[in-house]
Image (tube, coloured by chain):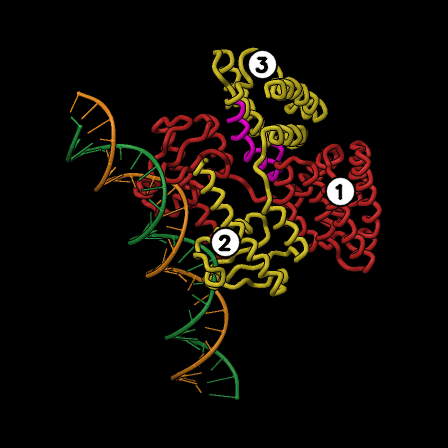
Chain colours: A red, B yellow, C green, D orange
Amino acid sequence: MNLEVLSISDNKKTQNVVIEKIRELINYKNLEPNDKLPSERMLSEKFGVSRGIVRTAIQKLEFYGLLKSIPQSGTFVADVGCIAMNGIIDDILDLETPDFKALVETRILLELKTVKLASLRRTETDLNRMKSALNAYTKKVLNNENAVQEDLLFHLAIAKASKNSTMNTFMLSITPEIITNFAKYHVCDDDLAMSGIDEHTAIYEAIKDQNPALAREKMKIHFKTLYQYCYNKQ
Amino acid sequence: MNLEVLSISDNKKTQNVVIEKIRELINYKNLEPNDKLPSERMLSEKFGVSRGIVRTAIQKLEFYGLLKSIPQSGTFVADVGCIAMNGIIDDILDLETPDFKALVETRILLELKTVKLASLRRTETDLNRMKSALNAYTKKVLNNENAVQEDLLFHLAIAKASKNSTMNTFMLSITPEIITNFAKYHVCDDDLAMSGIDEHTAIYEAIKDQNPALAREKMKIHFKTLYQYCYNKQ
DNA sequence: GGCAAAAGCGTGGTTAACCAATTTTAATGA
DNA sequence: TCATTAAAATTGGTTAACCACGCTTTTGCC
């Protein structure tokens, strides 16, 4: 029996119970968009938990855009109606932790888009950033060193050049997990990394030439190798 | 001069300063993956800020998968090397708040994929969930009521059926913001909602028939109307 | 000498007291 | 009666004290 997991699941459970209670309160009181929630102190008393717990629950709901806290004023229901609120909270409560396959699937989807957007929107600054990331990658690979980090930083530079901050944020949030798994499964070493230089360079050139179709095609080639490698390994 | 914005920016700044200092510490001490950071108390003392501030900074870095806190043990550097750590923190520090256009762009990208995955992976439970969401939407529209929420809940049901928890999470995190903006700009009313019934139904049927290509095509049609509407409105 | 048990210390997590700012209310004076 | 002002209460944010658990060290027994 793993105590640590138990305690974590306990924490999560407490947290979710409070979120559940906040949801019930909103329903019971028929709170509508921009209505004010009771103060954190009243909620903590009502729910029989400490104020800190209530705060973290509110922060989580705030992260998903369902509530909005304003200092010295109160916590308010966002411009999201009861029906959506209930549905979304339901989904939040049974969110699973993503598996590696889901991460890779999502990454490929995101990057086939960011590379096109980057081709259309990249500035000179973006090009410089990508170029130096590419150089760092090439240097490491030619030295026979592991270059997973430099690899991913090049891809992040593309995401940044896409000028879509949502996709950029999403890329940022999945990249560390991907690096971890790559390191664990020893994806991306030796000959694969070597061919990566050409592939990266091709992508860079296509973006530089502002050719979105070509850039996407080159990215697809890059991922084909990677994709097979990942799924064979697993 | 907006004082509220000033104070928020101040908070963010303090937060980012601490993140910056943690990064410098990791670099200075040459901390490698799985190395342990100094305790939160020591960090708060070293940085001259309260422990709570340090905690929130650590939690943010933990959210992005760069650190890992273990109760009664310590905070550890994730399996992400120094180079990636530095690059990602740089990006995190100047993340912009997403604009509506970026949200819609990302939503369309995600949904054209989730609808395909849902066609392949949906279970009977998923179908039931989508069906009842569709019914709720239809009912509201036929009553001439605003059905933005029901609309989005149908799309979330698809995301859930895609069995990709990463994409599901991403959809969840952008949906409230999208609903807010739809309500603000009065997207999705009247005749658009009416035609939405047929479009939604077509998508549902394609998923039911496990026809990913058709499902994607129907989703594309659905978005075409929406896309034009959004961009004309703005 | 070796091993086990217990005690002490260090950890992240939790709680409660405190703060600054804002809003509301009440009192006072015109 | 109304306006104005000041004080008190209410808010989310911050800080510091507290807790339960785990690890290490020390001590005592075999």
At a point 35% along the width and 48% down the height, the residue shown is A50
Q: Is residue B89 left or right of residue B141?
A: right
Real-space Cα separation, disc 1 to disc 3, in angstroms: 41 Å
Residue at left offset 64%, top offset 17%: B225
> The magenta stretch spans which residues?
B160-183
Badges 1 and 3: C-beta atoms under 8 Å apart? no
Q: Amino acid at mark 1?
A: Leu
- B112 drawn magenta: no
Label 3 neighbour load within 10 Å: few <14, some 14-19, many 20+: some
Q: Is label 2 in a helix, a strand or a loop?
A: helix
Location of mark 3 (residue): B192
Mark-to-mark CA distance, 2 and 1: 45 Å
Element marked by disc 1? helix
Q: Is residue A20 visible?
A: yes
- In the rendered structure, the answer to whether residue B39 lies left or right of residue B222 reads left
Tag shown at residue A5: 2
Q: What residue sits right under mark 1 in the picture?
A: A127
Q: Residues within 10 Å of mark 2 (few under 14, many from 20)?
A: few
- Image marks 3 and 2: residues in contact by CB distance under 8 Å: no
